[in-house]
Amino acid sequence: MSEPFDPQGFLPALSQTLLTPYGREGDGALCHQVSGFLAAQRRGLPHAMPYAMGLASVLMELSCVPLKGRRFSRLPLAARVEMVNFWRRAPLSAIRNFLKFHEVFAAYIAHSGPVELRPEMPAEKKADPA
Amino acid sequence: MSMLPQAHPPADLISAEIAIVGSGPGGAVTGMLLAQAGRDVVMLEEGAHVEVDAYRAFSPEEMHAKLRNNGMTMALGPSPVAFWEARCVGGGSEVNRGLYHRPSPEVIAAWAERQSIEALSPEDMTDLALEGEKVAKISTLPGPAPKVSLKLAEGAEAMGWSHMEVPRLYSYGADWQSAPQPGLKQSMSATYIPAFVAAGGRLQTGIRVTGLRRENGIWRLKARARGIWGQKTIEIRAKTVFIACGATQTPALLRRSGIKRHVGDSLAYHSMIKVVARFDEEITGDTPLDPVHQVKHFDPRFSLGASVSNPATTAFALSDRPDLLPRLASEWRHWGCYYAQSTGGMGTVRRLPGFEDPLIRAKDNPQDIEDLSAGLRALCECLFAAGAQAIYPNIQGAADLYGPQDLARLPRRLDPATVSLSTLHLTATCPMGAEDRGSVCDSFGRVWGAEDLYLADSAMLPGPTVVNPQGTIMAMARRNMNHFLH
């Protein structure tokens, strides 16, 4: 087991929460890996989807305030698990799909062994100059 | 010219007699034949050169090094279809499993008739495929197939359905069992591209062509070069241009360049749905070899196959069944991933102003959903006949199946909103054929209304290939090149 994980922000907090079904939420290195991979996958999405993902993250982070009294990333792990279970049954398919995207990649990385991703090219750009 | 990644920026202006945009199976075959004929050719590839065995297949590292958008490409529509699109030297041949079929004679005959394609015959295409197999070797597995694959064959046998071990573009050494990777994939970067470079062809990586226009009998390609040194805009000038960037990027480039007639109107793809089957005995992890069996009994409506089934890939196969994921670590050796694949997916490709990626839309095709539903049922029957104890269809809210009596619990017709479809085989966005048949290029890949501009990839095929398309793409590129050169 590696160092404990102190999630800073929505994505690291969500990553740690999504590892609880595997009993890996205390594996700091894995939490970092999942969080980093999810961030890279989100950046890789086509069109304006990375922005939509960012906006959805902000909304989901803040949606916990009226329900749990704190932002998602500030909640204790047990409360975050409850929120994820709540989102999993959300009537809005966009919320379920958002969760599915993160859940599948978290499972993929959790079962992939150590991952060493190459740094992205410095000038990577999504906008088309044509 | 080195095949290594460009450590230094390319010149602001690159000139050649012929420019090829893209280095996948179509571009690589075209390039090699042109270079061997003594022509001055430059091949432009947007991605990097990555050694074929640099990464574990289907690993996160491979995903980021070889795939466009880190593997996050999709066709939007009533049922979004996820697909992988390569962005590296060798294109799709670097990221597929190397399963190889010669062109289907029935499909080729149907294309020739429907599109009025001159001099296209199944016999000639088979001969062309055989010629290609001298460069990129195909072989069957050097040892017993993995159990996960044999289970499919066993089930098909019990059902009385025809099945086959599909050969692969692989070369196995005598030491395949002890080697770090069992065999070397005969991808383009290991076969045709080195032959292209050896014949004097120039390969430029990290170059994305953003548009082309013709001036004074010369094609001028505007491009963005990118590397560890940064990025800059460059120009490529060539008398003749072959576009081979794949079924979505080729129409996108044509449309960005003002060539729009029928371009991107007729995307065809094979839709795929997955299930995970649990067996009493361990069926995965028994050999480093990949599954290779397919059931082609129901061609051309649908086919069945076995997929790579390690814990990571199984996580993808259960994307709509998160309830099962916690069991993965302890049970994966008993679980095998299988797929049913139909051939009637349809859609369009359009430019989306302001964005690099084109907009790909999947159209609603009731017949395709019908075929896929029948394929899913047949797959489950086959796996139960092979002794599966449980089958988990990758469908939101679907019931687990514990025997043939549970097949009635499968939806009679899949609801596109509840299934996660994927595809690897996209074709036909710029089909070839007679001018009055909705085609973009003529019988040999020359773009209608554009002088010295040719297509040489899956985009020019007139429809779905029904089988894994790489063999068909390579044979068609060879055919068109023979015509061009002679």
Image (spheres, rainbow, N blue to C red):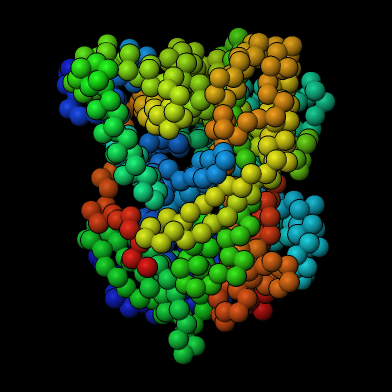
The reply, left or right, for residue B120 in relation to residue B264 is right
Q: Residue at x 57, y 72 (%)?
A: B454
Indicate the quadrant containing the N terminus of chain B: top left, top right, bottom left or bottom right: bottom left
The spot of residue B191 in percent (x, y) is 51, 56
B189 above or below B160? Answer: below
Q: Quadrant of residue B145?
A: top right
Indicate the position of residue B46 as horizontal and vertical percent values.
39, 60
Instruction: Give the residue at the far bottom of this rendering.
Output: B216
**In the rendered view of the protein, which quadrant contains the C terminus of chain B?**
bottom right
Task: Residue B125 in the image: state x and y as whole percent.
Answer: 73, 60
Q: In percent of the image, x 51 and y 59: which residue is there?
A: B350
B217 or B350: nearer the viewer: B350
| On screen, residue B93 above or below B338 | below
A89 lies left or right of B262: left
Position of residue A66 measured from the top left corner of the image (x, y, whole percent): 25, 20
Q: Nearer the viewer, residue A7 or B288?
A: A7
Up-down: is B368 above or below B415? below
Residue at the (22%, 61%) spot, across then down: B229
Depth check, front residue: B13 or A67: A67
